[in-house]
Image (cartoon, rainbow, N blue to C red):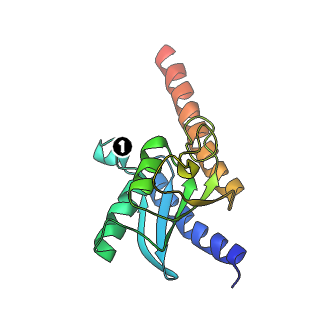
Amino acid sequence: MDAFEKNRMYMQLAIDEAMKAEALGEVPIGAIIVHDDKVIARAHNLRETSQNAVTHAELSAIQDACKEVGSWRLEDTTLYVTLEPCPMCAGAILQSRIPRVVYGARDLKGGCVDSLYRLLNDPRFNHECHVTEGVLAEECGEMLTAFFRAIRERKKENKKNNRA
């Protein structure tokens, strides 16, 4: 299997995690961490469920991967995530020394890998990541678009019902 196919296969696993989040009413973002062609951690957003601002998919996957390898250094791993990481998650990626990040859709309002900032490739930090963007981007982006569209429609319907 070549790198392109491998990226797509692992991103599909991250999408599967995002679907778990969506089933819980969470923003559909999923992440997995791979080491030596083996998935060592998988997670999805749980902010609404946990009422904890830091339970992003990436952070939960990083915590689980650290437990799995027995170290805070996640060298020789790859993080696959359906949405471009935010500043908090980009910081955790740098701190955990993940060398490679693959993401699906860009986050034009909060992404800190390519969209707003380039935190993972800033040479002023003591660690930099190789980044691959846009893997299954359409699928990842559509999942988020549909989720937020449904929320807006529910709000509009509730507003309409409250006026009646």
Vertical placement of residue 34 versus 23, above or below: below
Q: Residues within 10 Å of mark 1 (few under 14, many from 20)?
A: some
Task: Name the residue at the top extreme.
Answer: 163
Relative to 31, is 48 on the left or the right? left
Observer-nearest residue: 92 or 32? 92
Q: Residue at x 32, y 75 (%)?
A: 68
Is residue 40 found left or right of 155 in the rendered image? Answer: left
The reply to whether residue 25 is visible in this rendering is: no
In the picture, measured across the screen, residue 137 lies left or right of residue 40, that is: right
State the residue at coordinates (71%, 81%). Answer: 2
Expressed as whole percent of the image width and height from the top left, the position of residue 71 reads 30, 70
Q: Nearer the viewer, residue 117 or 127?
A: 127
| Residue at 44% across, 71% down | 75
Q: Position of residue 19 (x, y in %)?
A: 51, 59
Q: Secondary structure at mark 1?
A: helix
Q: How many marks?
A: 1
Amino acid at dot 1: Glu
Residue 68 in view (yes/no): yes
Relative vertical location of residue 64 with respect to residue 48 in this rendering, above or below: below
Q: Is residue 162 above or below residue 91?
A: above
Report which residue position mark 1 lands on: 48
Residue in the foreground of this view, choosing between 61 and 51: 61
Above or below residue 99? Residue 6 is: below
Towards the viewer: 147 or 155 = 147
Q: Quadrant of the N terminus?
A: bottom right
Q: Residue furthest bottom?
A: 1
Q: Position of residue 109 (x, y in %)?
A: 59, 34
Q: Provide residue 11's location: percent of width, then percent of height.
A: 59, 66
Q: Residue at x 39, y 60 (%)?
A: 96
